[in-house]
Each structure stands twice: as structure tokens, then as C-alpha cells.
Image (cartoon, helix red, strand yellow):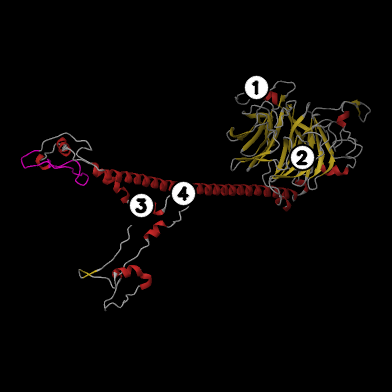
Amino acid sequence: MTPRMVNAATISGKPRQVAGSSSSLSRSRVDFATLGRAPMRLGIGTRRITSRDLQIVEASEELLEAEIPEPEGVAQDVSLIRGFNATIPSADKGRSRRRQTRNVDAPRMGLKKLGMSARGLMVDEEEHEGESVASEEDVVMVGRPEPRGRNLRPKKKGRQSLSAGKVIGTDELKRQTHEIKRDKENLHVRKSLIEGEIKEISHKIQTLDNLRAKLQEDLLKLQEDELELDDELEGVKERLDIEESRSRPPKARTQQPHVAQSSRRRKGPAFLPSEHDELPPGVAFMSLTGHNGPITALDFSEPYGTLVTASQEEFAPKVWDLLSGEEIGRLKGHRSTVKCIQVEDHVCLTGGEDGSVRLWDLRRVDEDEDWDKESEIVSLSEIAEEEEVDEFGGRTKAKTNGSIRQGESEAGSVSEKEGPCVRVLEGHSKAVTALYFEDDCLVTGASDKTMRQWDLTTGQCVMTMDILWAISHPPTAGPGLFPGAAAAAGTFAVPTPPYADGTWDMYQDFVGAVQFWGYALMSGSGDGAVRMWDMRTGQPHRTLFGHTGPVTSLQFDELHAVTGSLDKSIRIWDLRTGGIFETLKYDHAVTGLQFDTRKVVAAAGENGLKVYNRTSMQHSTLITNGHTRPVQKLRYMDKYMVSGGRDSIVKVWAL
């Protein structure tokens, strides 16, 4: 904008001089800051001097040259004044002027008349004869117009070229060149402004996306808290049921009080000591050393309770005090490696490659002062092949049909002194590789391709379930066995996929895992199938096909079953439909798992433990202060976990 300079005022239509001389006024530079707002008398006659009598001084040049701070993020290379000049409507006046300059007198094409005639309208030719297609505002007439009369029709001529009849001078061309460059600059300014706005909007969108992600995380956290409250309610109900059962009269109680209810389906979080909350999550805060080979099985009673672990090179499982981290004893009796362990309260059951299952009372472990010596409990099962003398002096043969040996004491064994082994159950012809018990019922699975149901009160085998018969008589049609599955009789052995450290084993556990609830029993076997059995009849009523390798671990609740396999996957099944709900893929074989409503924790052939958040569907790995070789077994309660690896070390974690 050009400042308006007022050098003189006109009063009553007559020009007059401003008080004093104009030269003296320009030198004094009187402005409003000096005069103030109120009218003043300058001593020139008696007339009042107003602002119209004064020269208004604007520092326009100084303002235009001053540095103007640019806004952050929006058109940083465009000044405010430049952006304003480029966006006002007058910025396009140069283009309009150039178009008018280049226009010529267009021929009278009579387009309007042709259009009216096409629509069947009568048009006065004489009325519109002299009109041009272009408007008067857009057309610059160059040259002399043709004469027109009332009765004379102008002579028609062809359309001229755009430059015909025009002579544009050098100054005009230079001016147009300058205007075109200025218009290009204006376009660049507009583009910069729009790009700046787009960038700002993108930044706002990113901010909103981050805010939405944060809110989604908060929502997932609330959902997990809700699930945790549901689990805690289940745990409180379980404890209430236990307390109510204890308050019943002695006759109404079960006759086998030493066998506790299984915690494999326990949903409620354990009531942990307050010290556990102070531990950093996802860190192994305790290491238990002493084994000479890879850990083959482990289980514990409760957080900071009693832990039992077994290794491949030792026949006697170790008993640990998790509160102090010290070894308190060993369970001697098995003649080969222990493959499976379950601990409930003070009761422990172990199954070994010798085909036997032993029931232990962990309260008696500390009573055996010589547990570290080579003295071994002598069981009647070891002399079962010898003849016994009955009360009449005759000799009889001890029975071996899947129960405790005849003549065995009610405690289950005869030893030089009473030890922790309460009972020995024999009946399987090969290694016992899986077991599960609740109350007085025990189910074992072995490499002889059978499962047996036991009554822990009497030690008798109640039922035998043959997996080979189930394979040959499938309840429903399925894809069959995975290639190479040795379903026939004989030794079952398949090589495991290499672990993360490159090592591998020959997997020989035909029954990888078992679990039951009420009369519903589930098993995972070497043919890759997951079978559901009715324990009242001993018959399978459903088979879940999907794994392409031996099933090594499983767990189920009311709605879902989770199974792990050597095919490097974990499958979550919907028990209502029998279909696969979700599949988790890993780089190595899965050898152990456990799940609850919030997470799935797995040993998948790596040094770290794999954790899958079922709410957010995110994967993570626990490695801090963890194993130096692949993990093989794990067990957790709420936020307290114990794992065993191929490094012969047992780790205790805070989840």
C-alpha cells in the first residue's frame, strides 16, 4: 500500500496554505504523538487546527524492510506480506490485463442465433447482427470499426489470428514478462502455503493417531484389569469352597485329605507377598543351579513355596525351597530319568522312564536326613518277581496287573526307615511321559501308547485307554496322521527340529500331555492329533486335527484348548465348534506352554520365553537375566513363573 500524503487542505473549496510554511512543517515532522488527541491551537489566528491540516508521516519503507518473524511449521519460506499479496484477488489482475491486450475483434459468428434457431425460436437477425461473441469488457478493439447502417450488412470475413491487427511494443512485452514472473512467484507462494497447511494437518492427524493409540492401550489395560478381577473372583470362590469343605463334619469329608485339588485350571491370581510387587517385571530374579543335564520336568506348589525339578542325567528329582532358593532334599526311588511332575500343596506325583509313577509326601523330605547319600528306598515292586510266603507257608506270585504290588503296605512301600515316597503305581510297560491328577483321580500317558486312569485312594488302575485303537477307529473323519508318524506298534521316535542353538533330540514321548476336567479328558499324542475322551467309557468322542507334528503340551478351560507341537506352532481351539480359533507360529519347536484369560507363555526352542498377550495380540520375549540355552519347561501362577532350560539351570521370574 502507498501511504497517502496530505500536503494541503481545502477549506470551503478554496486551497489555502497550512500554518507556517510547508518546508518548515516537513522539517519539524509534527505527528499525533506530539500533538495528542485533543484539538490544539498553534497560535495561527483563531482557527482550530485539525488532523486534516497536518502532514501525516508513515514509516512505510522502514516497515517493509523490517524483519518479520515467520510462523512455525506453516510456509516457513514465505513472509506474511508476500503471502498476503499473493493471495488477494488483485494478484490475478495482471493475467486479466494481458488477456485483454491480446484479444482481437472476433468475427461475428452468430453463435447465439444458431443456438436459438436450433431450438426453434425466431430471432431478429438485425437486432443481434452487430454483436460479437466476446463481451465488451473482455475485448479490446484494435483498429477502426466497420461502418454499419440500418440496411447495410457488414461484409463477412474470416477469423483473424490473435496477433492480427496488433502491434505490442517492447515496453509492454517487458512489462508482461515481469508480470508473468510475478504470477509464477505468486503461484509458488500459494503452493507453499497449501503445502504448509497440509503438513500441519498431517501433524495433527499424527498427533490424533498417537492419542488414539494411547487410548486404545488404556482400554486394553482396563480390559486386562477386568479379566484379572474375574480371575481373582474365581480364586476367592475356590478358597471359599476349600474353607467350607474343611468346616464340614469329619464324616462328610473325603477319605483322602492329603491329595489337593489341581491348580492347572486355577484362574484366580495367587495371593503373593508384597515383596513380589517391588520386583521389576519380566526379569529372572533367582537362579537355581545344581542339575547336571537339561531340565525335563518341574512344578511348584505356590509362589515362594516348594519346587520339584528333574533333569535328564539324574534319576532323583530335587526339592527346593523357593523362599530361600536352597535345595532341601531329593526324591529317590526312580531307576531312570523323570519325565513328568505335578505338585499340589504337599503332594507330588512323578512319572519316569522306568514306567512307574510315584506318590510323594513333600512334608517328609526334610525328615530324610541322609537324602544326599546313596541309600535307596526299597519297594516291594522291585522284588515283585520273587515268590512270597503266605500265612499257610505256601508260595504265591505277586500280581502285576496295573496296580500296587500285592503285599505292599498301606503306605505303599517298605523301607529301612520311613521316607517321602508314599506309593508306587506300576502298569505301563514303557516310559511315563505325562500325568495329571485332581482329587483322588490320576491319568497317566506313556510311550506304550496307552493312557491309564488310577484311583489314588486304593492305587488301583481303573481303566486303560488305547491310543492305537483310537487311531484305527476315528470318531470323525479327519486328514489323518502327519507324514512319518509312527502310529504302529513299536518304538516311537522322531527328530526334533533344531533348537536356536543348533542342538536337537530324538523325541520319544508318544503321549505329550494329558488333562481332564470332570469326565472330560484331553490328550495330545505323537500322531499330531488332539483327542477328547469320555472317562466314563474310555472312548474318544472327538479328534482335533491340525498339527503336523507330535503334540508336546496342552491345556484347556471351559471355552478354549491350547496345544503346542514340534511343528513350531501353538494352536488355540474353540471347544464349542472344534475349529482352530488362532494359530501362533514360531521359529522352533514348542516344548511347553501355559495360558490363562490374559496371556499364553511358551517355551519355543529359544533362550527367551515367548509371551503372547491375548487382549492386545502382541508378542514379547522374556530374556533379562534368563537362560543361556533354550528353555524346555515352564510353570507359572499369576505373575510368578519358574522355567527350566537346556543349560541345566532353573530360573524364577516376575511376570
Instruction: Tell me the SS state at disc 3.
Output: helix
User: Disc 3 versus disc 2: distance between alpha carbons?
Assistant: 76 Å
User: Which secondary structure is most common in the magenta stretch?
Assistant: loop
Q: Is residue 146 covered in magenta? A: yes
Disc sitting over residue 85 in the figure: 3
Q: Earlier in the sequence, mark 3 or mark 2?
A: 3
Q: Nearer the viewer, mark 4 or mark 1?
A: 4
Instruction: Tell me the SS state at disc 1.
Output: loop
The magenta stretch is 128-153
Q: Earlier in the sequence, mark 3 or mark 4?
A: 3
Q: Nearer the viewer, mark 2 or mark 4?
A: 4
User: Disc 3 versus disc 4: distance between alpha carbons?
Assistant: 22 Å
Task: Identify residue type, mark 1.
Answer: Pro
Task: Identify residue type, mark 3.
Answer: Asn
Q: In the image, 485: left or right of 8? A: right
Q: Nearer the viewer, mark 2 or mark 1?
A: 2
Quadrant position of residue 617: top right
User: Disc 4 versus disc 1: distance between alpha carbons?
Assistant: 59 Å
Q: Nearer the viewer, residue 285 or 245?
A: 285
Find disc 4 in the rendering and name its residue: 200
- Residue 229, x across and y down, in percent: 63, 49
Q: Earlier in the sequence, mark 1 or mark 3?
A: 3
Q: Earlier in the sequence, mark 2 or mark 4?
A: 4
Find disc 1 in the rendering and name its residue: 483
Pointer 4: residues within 10 angstroms few (<14), some, or many (20+)? some
User: Disc 2 versus disc 1: distance between alpha carbons?
Assistant: 35 Å
Q: Earlier in the sequence, mark 4 or mark 1?
A: 4
Find disc 2 in the rendering and name its residue: 650
User: Disc 1 versus disc 3: distance between alpha carbons?
Assistant: 78 Å
Quadrant position of residue 402: top right
- Residue 89, x across and y down, in percent: 31, 51
